Image: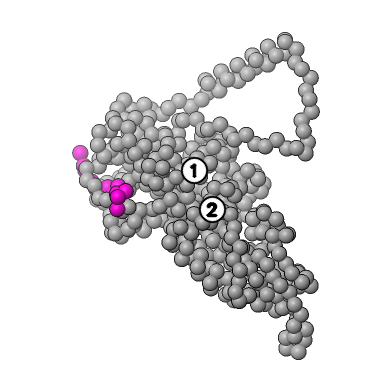
Amino acid sequence: MHEFSYYKINKLLWRWSKKQGASAIRDVKVSFDELPPALPVRPISKVAPASKQPRQSPWDEMLDDFGKFGTWLSESLTRPTPSPQQKHANVPPFDIQRIPRAMRKERMPVGAKLMERWFSGRLNYSPTPADEVAEINQAGQHYPADMYDTTSIKLDWVLKFARAKEKYDVLIGEAVRSSAARKVMHDKLTTYKYETRLFTSDLCGNDTRELHQRFQFQRVEVDGSFCEKLAAQLRADIERFGVPDDLSAALGSFNIYAAIGSVRFSRDYLGGSEATKADVTGVWIYVKDNYTFTDQQGERSQYLGHWSTAGVIVVPLDEVASFSSYVPYVDSPVTVGNPVIEGEVYYPVHNSDFREWSRKHQRGGDFIIYSDRRFVPMVPPITLYL
């Protein structure tokens, strides 16, 4: 049997550690058989309370119970059974819904929490990249309110990661004062040129989504999705790199945004004529990200590592070619020990696996993440003439 090397997280040094002795298993794959979690209870609208229904008679209640039993029996008979591959006599199955538990073992608790939210959500996805930008779902409608998460991600947590803090400093120190940013602010503030003061929180309240739509003017990208980091590291010397962290698992590549916060207006003379001077005295800073498992059309689905109940491992791409010209190694489950022991068989996972799970169960809710926001004074103010 062919054996090859793989990389496992060394939690002491927080680096990839090279191991030997993995071998492929051909007759198993990641399972989608576990039923999804119960749907979250959606709040009952107070606008139109349900009217009281007349109490059923004992005869009607009995018929209703028979109907419920018939529905349960029909669902039980038609419910998909485990595939033959997952009935392998020796290898314990690994269901894709167990990945969040494995993520916590790899010190990725926030990423695990967000993935669990996706699994527990009702079906919601954007058919095209353009729909995703417009936040339009498969029904041709705007994402419903419960597909916006404004509590899970805190800006303070994001900025604990050096690469995010570095981009944040660029945003508030340079990018908000760029010519491109000034042009956008100019266009957004023209409507308010006859005001004396503007506080966008007065107009938008605590609704960061509305603030983003009306007053966002600049952003910086923080790169490093889990799969992108794996790809970059496997093309180089993986042992020189740190492993993907909880920020990668939670947000992947994401943006830190700036929106207009407060403005002071005054009248001034510019070129011999009166003009409105707008001093932007503060901006709001926040994170926005789409939590989705969408691949680029026409491209191979993104690889997210090999997962088991024990965690994640990866394999260098240069070893793939030498291993098999028929089945790329990255698409094969591997065992790193005794395959009959749970956790010692690792399964390749891709974005497409989540989409397949979603099609099977008609669940899985793509959602929009907004962090809390921070008010940052602009000293000196950003001055514009309207």
Residue marked by disc 1: 113
Choose the circle earlier in sequence order: 1 or 2: 1
x and y percentages locating residue 6 in the rendered image:
27, 47
Residue visible at 65% across and 77% down in the picture = 383
| CB within 8 Å, label 1 to label 2 | no
Is 52 rendered above or below residue 192? above
Could you tell me which quadrant the N terminus lies in? top left
Q: Which of the two discs, 1 and 2, sits closer to the camera?
A: 2
Look at the image and name its color scheme: one colour
x and y percentages locating residue 222 in the rendered image:
48, 61
> Horizontally, is 201 left or right of 355 in the view?
right
Residue nearer the viewer, 380 or 300: 380
Residue nearer the viewer, 273 or 180: 273
Q: Quadrant of residue 379?
A: bottom right
Is 195 rendered above or below residue 45? below
Which label sits on residue 154? Answer: 2
Q: Is residue 180 visible?
A: no
Residue visible at 33% across and 27% down in the picture = 88
Q: Amino acid at mark 1?
A: Lys
- Which segment is the magenta one? 1-13
Residue visible at 32% across and 52% down in the picture = 14
Q: Amino acid at mark 2?
A: Lys
x and y percentages locating residue 270 in the rendered image:
72, 86
User: Farthest residue toward the bottom?
Assistant: 272
